[in-house]
Amino acid sequence: MLQSLFDGILVGSVLALGAIGLTLIMHILRFANFSHAELLSLGAYFALTFDAVFGAVSNVLVQKLPWLSVTWSLACAVLIAMALTGATAAIIDLLVFRRLRRLAGPLTMVFASFGVSLIVRNVIGLVYGLRSTHYNNDIVFAMMISADPLLLVKADQIFIMCLALVIMVALHLVLTRTSIGYTLLAVSENPTLAQVNGINLGATVRLAWMLGGGLAAIAGFCYALNNQLSPVMGRDLVLSLFAAAIVGGIGSIYGAVLGGLIVGLASSLALIIIPAGYKPAIPFLIILATLYVRPNGLFGQSR
Amino acid sequence: MIGLISYLTFFFTIALILAIAVLGLNLQWGFTGLFNGGVVAFFAAGAYGLIMLGGPARANEFGGFDLPYLIALAGGVLLSGVLALVVGLATTRLRHDYLAIATFGVAIAIESVARNAEYLTGGAKGLRGFERPLEAWVGQPQLYSFLFLCVVIVCLVGVYIALEKLVDSPFGRLLRAVRENERAAQSLGKSPAHIRLTAFVIGAMIMGLSGGLYATFYAFISPQDIAPILTFQIWAMLIVGGSGNNRGAILGTLVVWGGWVGSGWALTAFAPASMQLYAGSIQYILIGCIIVFTLLARPRGLLPERLTTTQYAESSVEKR
Amino acid sequence: MQNSERVGTQSTAESVLSIRGLTKRFDALVALDDVSLTVGRGSITGLIGPNGAGKSTLFNTVVGDVKPDLGSIEFNGKPIQGYTPDKVFRCGLARTFQIPQPFPEMTVLDNLMLSAPSQLGEKFWAPWFLQRKIQRQESIHLQQAHEILEFTTLDKVAHLAAAHLSGGQQKLLELARVLMSKPDMIMLDEPAAGVNPSLTQLLIEKIHQLNRSGITFLIIEHNMDLVMKHCDRIVALANGRIIFDGTAVDAQASEELLDSYLGQPGVGI
Amino acid sequence: MSSVARLDVSELTAGYVAGMPIISSIDVTVGVGEIVAVIGPNGAGKSTLLKAIAGLCHIESGAIHVDGTEVTGIRTDKLTRSGIAFVPQIENIFRSMTVEQNLILAGRRCDKQASSHVEKMLSLFPLLKKTYKKRAGELSGGQRQFLALAMALVAEPGLLLLDEPTAGLAPIAGQEVLSILREIANPGVGILLVEQNAKAALGLADRAYVLADGHNQHEGEARAMLSDPVLGEIYLGGRRRGDHAAKPV
């Protein structure tokens, strides 16, 4: 039970990071982006690549951070991966979604996002191989925090939670203290009024993609660090991300955070009663339940 | 020559079975504007339903009632319909992108049931041992394959005619109205939620029929056959062919399936051995590109929907 | 002023729509504040009032698009509050939209054919069992549709996609569509907005013709000439309340009504 | 950024859907520091006129010039950054953000440090000081209008486009809103004011235009118009009884 709670919060904080970008885009651009989860994979693999690059460049960087299996080079690589994933998201928008916004309705964009997700996922498979891999092949032992109830915790997992927390606090500060944050909040609340207040809508949409992509990269990295890297990790996560966004209420950044935690916890706790094989179906049940009970989610507004 | 004929038989059998599913999706998306992101779930319900009802008994497991083929097939179709009803009741009243997400989720849920509920679906190893109808009576396998293709063609033509009749009728007009402007339709006394649900269930049952035929053809169904890629393929077929046009849907199926099979063959024949492992990835990328490029370059497909007035009145009146 | 002789018989005439104590709040905003209103059978009633007075909300509430907080609505003596818009329509109360809502990728003729009430062919199983009956019904509807298209001068564009009509024609199409069901009462939401003067004239003629054939009209309209000349009775809303109910002549003399538009003098100087 | 601007609208035809213009061939001029009221019955196209100037409408023909530079169809955010502030009638504040955040966001338009401008706004609208940290969604109707005005003014515009600033306000709150406009206009800010309360608007403005059916109906000095019987006719149609007492009734 305690272990499930811990795992749930861990997965939940990763989902929260991923769902923030999803909910932003879904709210501002009014379409369900099925390819968002692929940005998580992309970010994780970008980190892998640049880890190797930095590791080759400098010996100092190969050293591990204290207690963790994460090396300095990997830590730097994550930063690069964030930037690259954000840029990729913006480029995909430029090439596909922006054109379709002019041509057709939101459902066409949903469909295009299906296509984009296929392309991204399989390009990753093509480039990096289909087999799953790890950032670090060393075996990391978990520490037993408590025997009864059993609680096994890895240092990396604590790191992931702290990282997620730090990022969310940072995001909160950006949103509430900086004009960039105000711009995002403003556009997601009322695009017309935002324009009236001198905000460039196109630039803000790009910003939202970059932010969503960057957060997705971190989420992907955290997920891969805790589990493994695999080209299909996006496919495995997409429904959970949607569940987090819907539970929180589309458009609410704080809702996405809470939604992520709820979905993570629910998925983890549900496994106490349901066989593990049914895990992929749990987010679906959460979505259905939310839509029945509270179609606008916890913090969402009806639209 | 014989090899070529039997290969073509195989190709067309699968293509035309898929065409039936594409027609079902066309009813949902092309005519009613319902985004079904989980086509494969209803396909799977038809396939599993058929084999569970018509297959041989399995020890300590549910299913295997050994029912007559047609009853089993109808049962599979019905199962798809029931699944669609359950999903539809929950989602057809919701915003459209929620429907897309929920149906996408259904497909994943069904796949995980197929993989895990061994007493029901045989788990990962699937359901086998199904005896194809009249196979023993026909005897010769090649002849049987050919006859089966004929049956598939009959089914496809039947579904096509039935759907044409349906979409040309006042019912079809109603579907288009709901697709075009739900609020206006409601203000004119129509009940959009009910209409959407009806179209969703009928479309799903057609997908179920497709799944049933597919399972008959292979006499086997396993989770491998209902991978999410099938949903993407079926969507690509509809978009390429032209949604809202049944002939376009069939044309799109042949084009995309031809491209899929052709690319698979070309990759096996020409790609270096080291790349063979990635043939699947390349094909998936192709499907993704087809979807995206069609939407960007020719969003109405090869055979776009035509603007026609429903002609259902007695001919004497039209001459006026 | 051909309807002026009917003015005065208003109060004694049987009412077709009767609204009592209708109240609707959106957050802090009171859109409808205890609105009571009866519409006499066979009348043309104009509903006027400044922007945001609650006129469209009244329409939306009556047809069930918006749920009222309080109040009752009776149509033809039958309570219809809580009905969905389709059910209200089937009771014989039709409405049009301020911004035309055509089925854009369907022909004008199909826009009308769709709107015919209780169609046998709208059941998915029917084409297989009732083909002859459906055909007969469609023939009747088709004839009716052609008549209405002619009546509304849309016959020349019958086979055009509705999306390709001009704004004014789309307004006419709104009216034409609801006529297919032979409603007892039609609520028109700004039928003349965005319509050129000659088409407006036509629209008015058609409304009078239909009115003579027994259809009751409740019309939201900003074109005051139109309202004053052609409505038997005028009801004015302001801030969600009825501030005036009477004839056009009285309306033009009403200082209160004028003030609701012009505001109080001297504010802010 | 210029702090004074002159607006010339000529022959403007615009609407929301192509081919369905709401206003046609409208001419409007606002001089430097002038308050110009646009009044007229509902559906006359007053709000559409403002939205068209602000770049939020589909413009079919005509031209809009600010200080002689053409700005017809310019992107809204560019226009508002160039010293033209538009205050929409409803939804003119960001409800989910605090008053402070609203003001800072609006102040971003000017290149200079926004904070000094925000200070200025707080002295102009002392009401906002008390609610500075509150979420804008919790403000009363009048407070919201003040915030919306402050958001428009914080970037020191040369021209202010106001869409019915008193709509939905209690009379006293409406009076307060209108009375502050004169103060705003004094340093040379032009104001184009669409107002439902025609009498109040005419009492405040220098000049006024009357719109009806999407056309210019009348133009003139505001105070003269107050006593013009034509006004009543435009609003209520026909001829008003009282204005023509000589006529046998």
Image: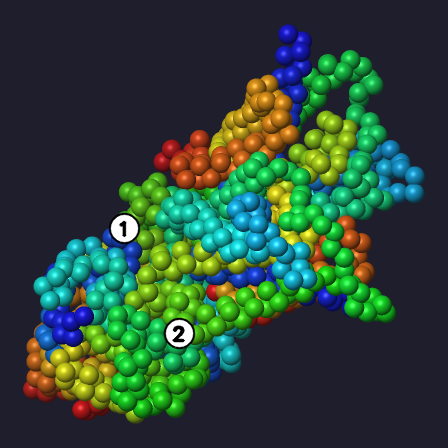
| Left or right of residue A224, residue C266 in this image | left
- Where is residue A26? Give x, y as percent: 49, 58
The residue under label 1 is: C166
For the residues labelled 2 and 1, the Cα–Cα distance comes to 37 Å
Residue at 39 percent across and 85 percent down: it is D132
Please tell me which residue lies in front, A162 or A285.
A162
Any mark on residue C262, and which? none
Chain letter, disc 1 residue: C
Q: Name the amino acid type tagged 2.
A: Phe
Residue at 35 percent across and 56 percent down: it is A202
- Where is residue D229? Give x, y as percent: 11, 82
- Where is residue D190? Give x, y as percent: 15, 76
Please tell me which residue lies in front, D160 or C132.
D160
Toward the right, the furthest residue is: B59
The residue under label 2 is: D94
Q: Secondary structure at mark 2?
A: loop
Residue at 45 percent across and 77 percent down: it is C26
**Where, quadrant-wise, is the N terminus of chain D in this rendering?**
bottom left
Q: Are marks 2 and 1 in contact (CB under 8 Å)?
A: no
| Left or right of residue A97, residue A69 in this image | right
- Where is residue C39? Give x, y as percent: 39, 74
Can residue C186 be seen at all in this image of the molecule? no
Q: Is residue B48 above or below residue C178?
A: above
**Where, quadrant-wise, is the C terminus of chain D in this rendering?**
bottom left
